Image: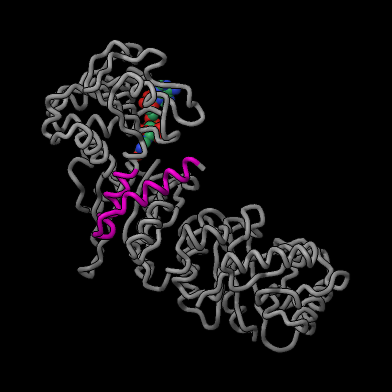
Amino acid sequence: MTKLCVPIFVESVEQAHRDAMLSAEAGADLVEYRIDLFDPQSDPGLVARSPLPCIVTCRPTNEGGHSELESAQRLEILANQLQAGASYADIELATYQSDQKGVPAGGRLIVSSHDFKGRPDRLYNILSELNSNPAEVSKIVWMARSIRDNLEAFEILQTRQKPTIALCMGEAGLISRVLAKKFGAFLTFASLRDESATAPGQVTIHDMKRLYRWDALNPKSKVFGVVACPVKHSMSPAIHNAAFDATGFDGVYLPMLVQPEYEAFKAFMESFLAFEPLDLTGLSITIPHKENALRYLQEKGAQIEPLAETIGAVNTIIIDRSSGDVKLSGRNTDYAAILDAITDQLKIHREDLANYRVAVIGAGGTGRTAVAALAAYGATVVVYNRTRDRADALAGEFNGKTGKVVSAPLEKLCDSCCRIYLNTTSIGMHPNIDESPFGNRAPKLSADTVVFDAVYNPIQTKLLRQAKEAGAQTIGGVEMFIRQAAAQFLAFTGIPAPTDVMHNVIVKRLTA
Ligand code: NAP
């Protein structure tokens, strides 16, 4: 079973003991004491007082550490710690090769290689050198050049000749840290706190356990993810993983950093789909990849929901291998989230939208989704946008397809007379929470009017407050976010989404 190891940079035995106790409480299986700048002779008892089995490491500066000691001195210190009862000592391959006489006798060695610049050219030579020495565990770590490097780490784990650690550093390498358990690594590292990470891209033990479902992960777990750039602040991993927990679905959902260009997206898809053992089953697609996803699926001749093609954006990819081949399909759950939030609020069917006049504020990606969806069901849509040309172009594209679509200057919004107002701009979004598309003068609103703000941070925007004060009905961006995610969850798993759980997760994050 893959162990969860918390690295602790040792300053004193007292501090290391405290952090090791906290690591044990957080669920770590072992700790790694980094003694690069610590002298165990001047402050004895580090290993003896350890509440968990431990690795000791004294990393030199040329392998990303801080120790300036000669390798013979470092090896002597590590040998003493092994004698004191440490479970393992970690020695760099270069040190092992240059100073074999000083290497502590007996097993309990991890021999390691690190490359902080990228994938080493000699990756497979290094691997065979690691495997051919008598150490109990091989460790190879490099900085991910792209998310595709993780696949090589998984292959190394799959073909391991002895217990192995294979990890990619950096944000793009996050999936190798979590999926180490799926592929049977000897261990993975997780930091006690954000600031105590000893390598780029290390996640905290709290996130590893709670957010990425460490305890539930197993070799059969299905893999999902959100493909974006940047991806760090996405809330999708939190809500989908919480939904897996709540429904008992055997899956894990990860942030997947893919560079914006189509070629990068295509290379990601091709390599990840080809690597069957990953069990990649579903992807959420967001900025800037929704158009890339559509283009890729079109090139592959995949099944694509017609309205997703009309909108020109796919936000969900389903990967089905049940027939033996890879079958891809693409959807857009954003448009359904917009339509259903409105029709549920008004207690009408989508076809009834033909009787409604809707103001769509914004002509970006979400504005386009809203206009296409509302127009497809016959609504009369007025597009208001800061850049008038974009509003004109959007209206021109969809006018007359089913409903009527016209554009109007954003300054005229307060004079408009619509039953539904939908803000798809970022006006009012954190940190500009005192702004509203209505400015300080709302149009004529009544109890029949619905005001819908796609902005979800803050939960209560100024626009929603203005609408409530005027007695109008409101729909917030959180509802849209949960509806699109819930539709993805159903498409991914075949299980209705636990929307209450998703709602609580997102509200907790937004109010934290
Ligand atoms: P986008 O493609 O970049 O479009 C941004 C739109 O906002 C454009 O129409 C832009 O007008 C307008 N805009 C930006 N700043 C403005 C300002 N200061 N004054 C007036 N107009 C301004 O972005 P998007 O992906 O559609 O996202 C738009 C908003 O929807 C964001 O707040 C996002 O968080 C939210 N959203 C929510 C959900 C959800 O599930 N709740 C889903 C998707 C998006 P110009 O054309 O003049 O630049």
Identify which residue, 250 or 222, lies in the foreground: 250
Q: Residue 429, relative to residue 206: is it above or below?
A: above
Ligand 1 found in image quarter = top left
Q: Residue at x 25, y 37 (%)?
A: 341
Q: Residue at x 41, y 28 (%)?
A: 461
At which x and y percent is residue 223?
37, 62
Q: Is residue 490 visible?
A: yes
What residue occupies the far bottom of the structure in this picture? Answer: 106
Identify which residue, 159 or 417, lies in the foreground: 417
Question: Going by the image, does 55 lie left or right of 313?
Answer: right
At which x and y percent is residue 444?
28, 13
Asked whether 131 falls inside the magenta stretch, the response is no
- Give the prevailing secondary structure in the magenta stretch: helix
Identify which residue, 18 or 228, lies in the foreground: 18
Asked whether 495 falls inside the magenta stretch, the response is yes
At which x and y percent is residue 13?
79, 67
Identify which residue, 229 or 210, lies in the foreground: 210
Which region of the structure is painted magenta? 482-511
Q: Residue at x 88, y 70 (%)?
A: 42
Q: Quadrant of residue 491?
A: bottom left
Question: Going by the image, does 276 lie left or right of 15?
Answer: left
Q: How many marks?
A: 0
Q: Is residue 395 visible?
A: no
Q: Residue 366, relative to residue 153: is it above or below?
A: above
Q: Quadrant of residue 252?
A: bottom left
Q: Residue at x 74, y 65 (%)?
A: 16
Question: Going by the image, does 332 lie left or right of 83?
Answer: left
Q: Residue 273, relative to residue 386: is it above or below?
A: below
Question: What sort of colour scheme is used for the picture?
Answer: one colour
Q: Residue 98, relative to residue 356: is it above or below?
A: below
At which x and y percent is residue 220?
36, 72
